[in-house]
Every structure is written in structure tokens, then in C-alpha cells.
Image (tube, grey):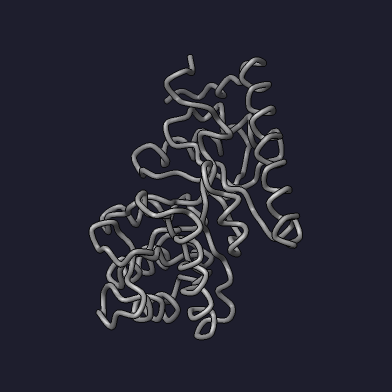
Amino acid sequence: MTDAKPTVLPARQAELAAGLAQVQARISDACAVAGRARSEVTMVAVTKTYPASDVLALTGLGVTEVGENRDQEAAGKAAEVAAAGATPRWHFIGQLQRNKCRSVVGYADVVQSVDSARLARALAAAAVAVRDRPLDVLIQVSIDGDPARGGVLPGSADPDAGLHPVAEAAARADGLRLAGLMAVAPLDWEPERAFARLAEVAREFRAAHPEAVVLSAGMSGDLETAIGYGATHVRVGSALLGMRSTLR
């Protein structure tokens, strides 16, 4: 890494502006169809594999929420962006190993992928040691109940992998703020079925945790359906930034 500020090329700025306008229009239309206010839905720009210059371009266009999947990429990128004077709200959305918690809590404002009580406790310990304010966390839910896909299991009493025990561990932990739920629609499910199931889980979850209202669901291909079923945050990568392999 150098001390030089990442360069945003005018052509790339124009591409990102066009992509952002299209995505924002899709979100606005979906909110209108669902009878929801546009202000109820936040877009998280997923910038994994894209350079820090793209993050700077997006923040210059008004994007305030940025998501990353891998700590080894995100840590350096967040440092570059901060050195350039931009301050987006960083979401860590990928699978997280406990030995990476201390690094992640140093730059992330939100961890969307808490999938065990052990991870919640590790994040809490790191947050207390590193941060001067609580870390927002979302519990990742397995929509289809397949543990191989990742996410906690609704209805399970497993102390490390059940939704209620993991949520309770996060809610009780110093250094964390339980903010809500996150999920990814299984590839072999229709989005309508997946997000309808997630909405049921979210209703039950909020009865126990009424302040944890965030529901992160929906990506480039299914954000409209997710918004129809109550998503408060949608995670958008390719529809916003294009396909990474085409960039130069």
C-alpha cells in the first residue's frame, strides 16, 4: 500500500453513477409496490474484489454503507479509504473466523454474519478491547435449516447454533448491540418462498427482541422480493459495480 490517494477515473465514476441510479430506482419502485417509504430501505454496496477507488467514487456519489466479505481484503481497503478522508459505514458480511475478530472490529461498524454463540462472545471480547462504542451485530439465519449453508437454526435449542441462544448471547454481551437478522436466499429456493419464510422468523424474533429491527436480505437479483417481505437493508454488488472481470 502507498500513501497516494486511490485515483477515481472519470469513466469509472460515470459507470458507477449509472449503476447507482439504476439500483436506487429499483429500490424506490420496490418500496412503492410494497407500500413502504423509501427511507425504510438502506442499500449496502458490496465492494468485495473491487478497489478502494471504487469505494471512494461511491462515497462521492452519496453511498454511506459499504460491505466486505473477507478480512484480508477489507482491512487494507478500509485503511486506504480512511486515509483518503472518506468515512462510510463498513459492514462485514462474510463468514468470520474467531481469530479474525480483533481485526474486523477495528474497522467494521456492523458484523452481519454472527452464526454462533462462540463467535458472538469472541466479537464481544474484541470489541471491548478495541472499540470505544458498541459493535452492531446481525444474526445470520439459515432459511432452509441446512447447517452446511451457514447461519443459525430457527427453532433450535442448540446453545451454540440455535437462533434464540445465539441472539441471547449477543444481546447480553458487553461491547455488542444486537441489531437484527441477516439471511441469504438458498440457491435452490424461489426468492418468494425464501423471504416469506424469513419474514416469519423475523416476526418471532422481534417479539423477543423488539429493538432489533434490522433485516438484511436481498441482493442484486432478488432485492425487490426481499423488500416486499420487509428487508430493511439490501446488499448490492454486481448490479451496482458491474462484473469484476470486465474492469481494467
Q: Residue at x 46, y 70 (%)?
A: 176
Quick one: 62 or 213, which is closer to the camera?
A: 213
Residue 113, image x and y in percent?
A: 39, 59
Quick one: 102 or 211, which is closer to the camera?
A: 211
Q: In this view, does 171 lie above or below 110?
A: below
Q: Is residue 230 above or below residue 222?
A: below
Residue 123, image x and y in percent?
A: 36, 64
Residue 134, image x and y in percent?
A: 51, 67
- Look at the image and tell me in which quarter the N terminus lies: top left
Quadrant housing residue 130: bottom left
Residue 39, image x and y in percent?
A: 74, 57
Q: Residue at x 56, y 42 (%)?
A: 45
Position of 148 with respect to 66 (left or right) is left
Position of 51 with respect to 64 (left or right) is left
Q: Is residue 85 above or below residue 169?
A: above
Q: Which residue is drawn at 42% across and 40% down?
A: 74
Q: Residue at x 47, y 49 (%)?
A: 107
Query: Number of numbered discs present?
Result: 0
